[in-house]
Amino acid sequence: MSNPALGKPLSGKRRLKDLLLQGDNRVCADCGAPDPKWASTNIGVFICLKCCGVHRSLGINISKVLSVTLDEWSNDEIDAMDEVGGNASANAIYEAFFPEGISKPGPDSSHEQRSKFIRSKYELQEFLKPSLRILSAPRKNSLQSSLSRKIMDSFRSSSSSQKMEGTVEFIGLLKVKVIKGTNLAIRDMLSSDPYVVLTLGQKKVQTNVINSNLNPVWNQELSLSVPQHFGPLKLQVFDHDTFSADDIMGEAEVDIQPMITSATAFGDAGMFGNMQIGKWLKSHDNALIDDSTVNIVDGKVKQAVSLKLQNVESGEIDLELEWMPLEE
């Protein structure tokens, strides 16, 4: 990573700061506490002080903990954190399966609750995708290194299924079914004529206009190619006007990283029965109304998303996403 203005590599501290500014890294990967200042460098997650204590108790063979502000980091350690892609990407792997009755601890949970969850998550691998679990190891200190290699391979595996479209590398197709809007804002005299615009990278698609309706039902499927270096799916709602510029009726962003990461880790979804494989968690940094789970449904990777529109007085949008990776 370089400083575009000077053409010089960014310092390690600056790279760490940039990683921490990512939305999913602003809360602890294990309990959701805000503003984490510690990290497990071999797992690739940012964590709070309370969870840091539990990680240290696991031993460095399981979790090597460093302070973001106090410790010196090697370039390899920063590269490893960068490659994992953040807390959401790591949790899509480490929290792929939540058994009935299991829930994450919160920022105010007891040490016992926190310790039990973290040990189950990382040491016992109880929530991990089965194909990534290390069932036996000749030496204890080889456990996490073997697990880390398998998980890092799963993060890298998406690069083997890229296709070229012009000068941009694409890794798959995202189908977005725009289902409905609820309690949308009034932009005409008594109602609005809403339509939805979706943007991913340089691609933009939109739904049909539904006239005079604040609770429109579209049930319209749109498709977007996903580039290798993708950002969030951006959603905007507009009121169609015939004689003037269309008025904005709110916006929101959808983080598609958890869906793509968990789908990539599982590979061929057709080989699995119906199950949950990942989750995008509601937080103060996103527009989610509730936690959004990633599921395999009839051999397809799907995710239902309910969003509260931002920068507007009212309005919600319901979507259904489907991920289709490009084959080699």
Image: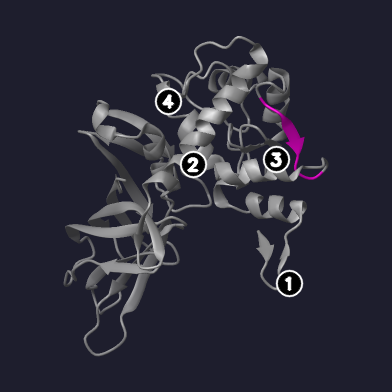
Which residue position is annotated with label 1? Answer: 6
Residue where numbered disc 4 is placed: 129
> Which tag, 1 or 3, sits closer to the chain's start?
1
Q: Amino acid at mark 4?
A: Lys
Residue that mark 2 sits on: 156
Label 4 vs 1, first from the N-terminus: 1
- Between the residue at mark 3 and the residue at mark 4, the CA separation in whole angstroms equals 24 Å
Task: Tell me: residue 279, above or below residue 288.
Answer: above
User: Which one is closest to the eye, mark 4 or mark 1?
Assistant: 1
Q: Is residue 314 left or right of residue 21?
A: left
Q: Quadrant of residue 25?
A: top right
Q: Which residues are magenta?
A: 63-69
Query: Is 157 left, or right, of 56 in this rendering?
Result: left
- Select label 3 or label 4 by which is in front: 3
Q: What numbered label is drawn on residue 77? A: 3
Picture coordinates of residue 19, whole percent (x, y): 64, 51
- Dot placed on the residue nearer the N-terminal end, 4 or 2: 4
| Mark 3 surroundings within 10 Å by alpha-carbon count, few (fewer than 14), some (14 through 19), many (20 or more) | some
* Label 2, label 3: how far apart the Cα atoms are: 17 Å
